[in-house]
Amino acid sequence: MSSSIPAHVQEAIQAFVAKMGIREPRLAVSSGSRNGDSYSGDVYRIVVSPGSRDIEDFENNNNNNNNNNNNNNNNGSHGNGHHQGDEEGLIFNELPKAISVIAKVAPTTSLRRSLYNSSAHFQREKYVFDVVLPMFERFQVARGLRTAKRFAHYPSVIVSECCEGFEYILQRDLMSQGYRNFPRTEPLAYDDVLLVLTHLAQFHAISFAMQQQAPEVYATIVAQLQETIFVPPLHSSFVDFLQRKVDYAIETLRHSPEAGDGAVGERLCRFRDEYGQAMVDCVQNRDDTVICHGDCWISNILYRPNPSQRNGTEDGLNNNNNSNNNSFSHHQHFQNAKEVKFLDWQVARCGTPAIDLSYFIFCCTDSELRERLPELLRKYHSALVRRMEELGISNGRELFPFERLQMHMKKYARFGFGMALMTLHSTCCVEKDLPNVSAALETTELVDIDKLAKDMLYNPAYIKRMSGVCRDMVRFGYL
């Protein structure tokens, strides 16, 4: 990733901060994501501060205002009225504060753009922020849901552009508001998993309610959410890539054998041949569908601690706002996490709720926590029905009973398993040991990229997590 932002993004930032009184901004640019978190584009964190011209204008206007006030006092002016000059002077009473923003910028190299379908995915995220989420917000307001209850767990977008080759999304920096990354290599604790599942339930409930109460509006929205990744026929190189991931998973069973692994291995071998088609089948299902986040893994979820733990970061810049430095003391802090935000809506899709649930569960938890998966699914479903009722659906349990959720998990949890096969080797790898795939794609052919992952396959953390996922898929009857 370049250390400087593209000119068209810089122009957008300048136009934005000009409205806040910063006419000659100073930009401090750094990486806005951890290595391994973002492949479809480059993410920059830009701290925008007033420049020398802004400071000079501020000082000059303050001096002029002081002189005007002195003249008014000498002329006997008093009372509560303001002269026009006084009102204009108020604008300069305080130098504009530094502002931190995040810029997601599409890659320019043809290989990387083609591999990650950059144009379609930036268009998808723009559509979600311009149309889907505002529609959801208006629907919740119309149903009388008070502000604190509404699903608004996403960043605020400032401006976005999807002109071919110049795509970008500029949004407020959540880190400057006290949000933090979860450590990517650590499975989430129970309380954090329940928190995320509850918010997913509230998000999914909007789709169920809109289908009942505003079906034409909902149909218009989802008509634009065509699948962008698992589109048949899958290219043979992609199928080969997927099958290699199953081979890696089978190897984890050999490195860490347990009783019953023979049956697990047999299921994996069968899944190897149907992997690609299974993913297509999952995203093509049109029974009991909702709008899904679509990419619900640990790096796309930020959390903010209880107010007592925020250390004054709510409104100002966070001194620890580099995402690489925000993954500390997770057992101490995460149990008290009360607010989360979902990032990266580039693959939002219409599909079964099991897409989001299985993806999150099998990519972000370990076998020990999944012992409580039936309980967590019950709680997700209770939260879903409760929010449907709050949105005016009186028969939520009949509309989508728990037994149907279980059926969806039986049929479509393969999606989350498929995503775990593709991602867990990098998720379990500490950042310093991760290959820079994005940089490699600037100069390397795709066939060589998979070789970069070889060393990660012997990581004990990956072996433990991946073998556990394979066994749990069979144990729960999902594979």
Image: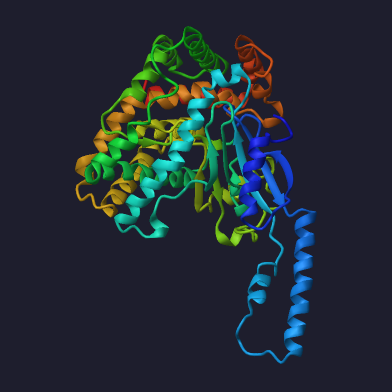
Q: Is residue 35 at all visible to an observer of this figure?
A: yes
- 36 over 262 or under it: above or below: below
**Residue 36 spot, x, y in % from top left:** 62, 29
Depth order, front residue of 374/326: 326
**Residue 366 visible in the shown view:** no
How is the model colour-coded? Answer: rainbow
For this rendering, which residue is in front, 478 or 244?
A: 244
Q: Where is residue 255 in the image (x, y as percent from the top left)?
A: 57, 16
Task: Identify the residue at horizontal 79%, vertical 66% (top origin).
Answer: 59
Q: Would you place residue 58 above or below residue 367 in this image?
A: below
Indicate the quadrant containing the C terminus: top left, top right, bottom left or bottom right: top left
Residue 73 % position (x, y)? 74, 88
Q: Is residue 52 left or right of residue 362?
A: right
Looking at the rendered image, the quarter that the N terminus falls into is top right
Residue drawn at x 58%, y 23% is 425
Taking 139 as reference, is 463 above or below it? above
**56 versus 166 height, above or below:** below
| Residue 397 placement, left or right of 373 | left
**Residue 334 screen position, x and y as percent:** 56, 48
Q: Is residue 215 left or right of residue 173?
A: left
